[in-house]
Structure formats: structure tokens, C-alpha cells
């Protein structure tokens, strides 16, 4: 992150996921006079400088017999990109970065306050890309299937791994029809990015950090649940818990939970769901959920509802290891916790 007070938001992820449209929406929201957009594509190297991919498909499908490798970070002049960000961060209160390869560039990632990775399924992505006519140079036959989308999948996997230890990175699936470029959808999406804080992490959870994320001057109440690993379950001594998940599926489900909470409790201002992954020792936090509202009752009820939805629907794998060497694992949801809640 930069040393001054400039806020740098990066919109990364899949090609044709709506990054540029969202960047303009955020510019309007933050204020055009205080916000600038920097597009990664401004810093492409020339075709002579970009690596060529001699793929068998290119030999068959293209005149030149190769593809240019425009979807790897080596095609970008990263130093110029960085210099521009540093320059604009001194002139503007907010800088919005737009680019599909931002998470691949360590120098750029280091400058960002928040990174939102937009994800798309291949069918939706192909349909949107084929409808575009403004690519320079235009897509050559087979480029999307043999270069662009495979590169996106590699970048996405690396971003997923990075996100488990980097709290600035989050994911939003924009494949659904409701994410077409309509003003109402964009505004709702903007609210998701700014007000719904979702994190799956290998790092220890800090309740105070989560509370700060949901704090807002208009809210008189913050309700926080801190789920801590206990030392026993069903009469057996617990050594530790372990959690794992399919990250992108879990992010999608957790965002759905946030949407449901907002539908049931319209005055909720901010929501945070932080879930630990990996080994969690006794006494450490497994999950922290927090909501803020102008009214105490709604915040308390919303947090409790969020806990129940998480327990019943989050696709997170939970494993318990006991002092006698036995282990117990449940795939797909917190089944053991659900059973506990039904007993109480």
C-alpha cells in the first residue's frame, strides 16, 4: 500500500467480467474529481516485445502460425504501470486499477488496499468475448480457448492460494444473469464490495479487525460472534480442528448468505464473515461474524441468523482430531455443529 492516504482498489479477474464498467461506477461513487482509473491495458508492450506461443492450434487456425502471449504479466510494462500508480496516488484520493493480470504482479499487488477478483464460467465468458469488437489487435481464431481462458484459470488458482494469507483479496462470481450491466445491478454490486467483508484465511482471526470493518458512524450497534475451538466434543477430548473448502464455491455461498441477511434485515449496514482454514488449535477462533445496524435488536438477530445460515449451508469441510488419535470429518457443511444446535 502507498504511504499517503490514497485508497487503491484493484478490480482484477476474468476477461469480460465487467471490470471497466465497475471501475467507472466506483469513480462516480467516490467522486470523479477525487478518483482516477488506471487500466492495465495501457501498459502493454508492442507485439515485437511480446512472447510468441507456437501452439499446434495456432499453426492450423492462424496465418502467422502462432499466438501472441497477451495474457501473461510479461506482456505488461510493470514498471511503467507502477510509476503511474505512484504518480496518480499523490494527485487523487482514490485510484482504481482495472486489469485481468493484476494479481500476477507482485509490485502492483503491494500497492493495493483491496483487490476484488471477478470470476466467470467459460460459457458466459466466451459469449461476452465473442460479442466484443474493440480488441486491438482482434482475437485470432482459437485464442480464447487455447490462450486467454487457460491463462485466466492459472491466474485464478494463484490468486486463490495468495488470498489465504492476504486479507486484501476477495472473490465475486459474476456469472449469474443478474450481473448484466444494468445500473441497479451495478449499484448492488458496489455495495457488496464496500459493505460485505468475506474472508477465508489460513491466518489467525482477529476479532478487533472484523469489528473495525463493520463499524460505521450511522450505526449504534455492532453484534459479533466469535466461534472458538473448544477442547471437547461428544465426550471426547479435542486436540484441534481443521477446516478446508473449495474457496470459490464457498465465497459464492457466503456472498449469498450476505444477500439473504440484507433481504431479511434491510437496515443492516455492514456484514463481515471471516472463516479460518487449516489447523485451528483449542482456544483459537474458527469463525468471526459481525454485523452493524442503527438498532441493537436487528444487529443481534442478523448475526444469529448469519451463524445459522453458515452452519447449514457453507460448503466448508470440518475435521476434528481427538486425544485418542481418532479423527472425524464431515464434508460439505458443519454437520456436527448442526447436530449440537438441534440438541440444545
Image (cartoon, rainbow, N blue to C red):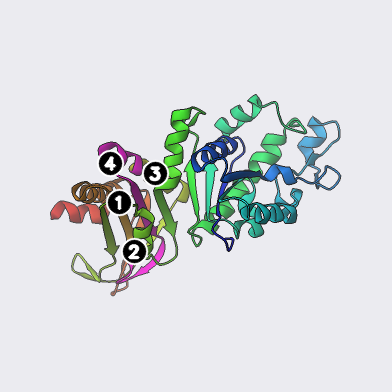
* 241 with respect to 98 (left or right): left
The residue indicated by pointer 2 is 207
The residue indicated by pointer 4 is 267
* Dot 1 or dot 3, earlier in sequence: 3
Residue 66 lies, in percent from the top left, at 82, 39
| Labelled pair 1, 3 in contact (Cβ < 8 Å) | no
Q: Nearer the viewer, residue 210 or 143?
A: 210
* Dot 4 or dot 3, earlier in sequence: 3
* Dot 3 or dot 2, earlier in sequence: 2
Q: Which residues are magenta?
A: 258-285
User: Within the magenta stretch, is there residue 195?
Assistant: no
Residue 105 lies, in percent from the top left, at 66, 55
Please name the residue shown 50% across and 34% down the image: 175
The residue indicated by pointer 1 is 291
* 135 with respect to 251 (left or right): right
The residue indicated by pointer 3 is 255
Amino acid at each position: 500500500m502507498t504511504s499517503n492516504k490514497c485508497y487503491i482498489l484493484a478490480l482484477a479477474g476474468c476477461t469480460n467480467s465487467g471490470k471497466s464498467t465497475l471501475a467507472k461506477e466506483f469513480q462516480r461513487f467516490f467522486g470523479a474529481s477525487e478518483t482516477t482509473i488506471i487500466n492495465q491495458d495501457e501498459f502493454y508492450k508492442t507485439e515485437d516485445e511480446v512472447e510468441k506461443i507456437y501452439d499446434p492450434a495456432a499453426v492450423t487456425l492462424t496465418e502467422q502460425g502462432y499466438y501472441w502471449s497477451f495474457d501473461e504479466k510479461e506482456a505488461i510494462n510493470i514498471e511503467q504501470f507502477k510509476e503511474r500508480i505512484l504518480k496518480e496516488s499523490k494527485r487523487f484520493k482514490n485510484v482504481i486499477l482495472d486489469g485481468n493480470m493484476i494479481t500476477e504482479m507482485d509490485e502492483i499487488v503491494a500497492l493495493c488496499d483491496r483487490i476484488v477478483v471477478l470470476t466467470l464460467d467459460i460459457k458466459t465468458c466466451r459469449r461476452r468475448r465473442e460479442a466484443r469488437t474493440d480488441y486491438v489487435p482482434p482475437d485470432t481464431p482459437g485464442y480464447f480457448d487455447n490462450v486467454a481462458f487457460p491463462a485466466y484459470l492459472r491466474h485464478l488458482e494463484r490468486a486463490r492460494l495468495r488470498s489465504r494469507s492476504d486479507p486484501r483479496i476477495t472473490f465475486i462470481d459474476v456469472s449469474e444473469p443478474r450481473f448484466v450491466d444494468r445500473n441497479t445491478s451495478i449499484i448492488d454490486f458496489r455495495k457488496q464490495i464496500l459493505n460485505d467483508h468475506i474472508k477465508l484465511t489460513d491466518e489467525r482471526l482477529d476479532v478487533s479487525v472484523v469489528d473495525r470493518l463493520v463499524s460505521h458512524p450511522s450505526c449504534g450497534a455492532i453484534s459479533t460472534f466469535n466461534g472458538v475451538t473448544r477442547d471437547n466434543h461428544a465426550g471426547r477430548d479435542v486436540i484441534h480442528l481443521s477446516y478446508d473448502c473449495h474457496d470459490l464455491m464457498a465465497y459464492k455461498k457466503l456472498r449469498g448468505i450476505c444477500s439473504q441477511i440484507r433481504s431479511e434485515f434491510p437496515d443492516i449496514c455492514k456484514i463481515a464473515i471471516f472463516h479460518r482454514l487449516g489447523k485451528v488449535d483449542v482456544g483459537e477462533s474458527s469463525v468471526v461474524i459481525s454485523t452493524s445496524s442503527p438498532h441493537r435488536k436487528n444487529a443481534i438477530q442478523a448475526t444469529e441468523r448469519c451463524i445459522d445460515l453458515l452452519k447449514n449451508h457453507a460448503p466448508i469441510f470440518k475435521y476434528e482430531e481427538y486425544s485418542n488419535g481418532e479423527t472425524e470429518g464431515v464434508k460439505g457443511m458443519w454437520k456436527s455443529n448442526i447436530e449440537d444446535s438441534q440438541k440444545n
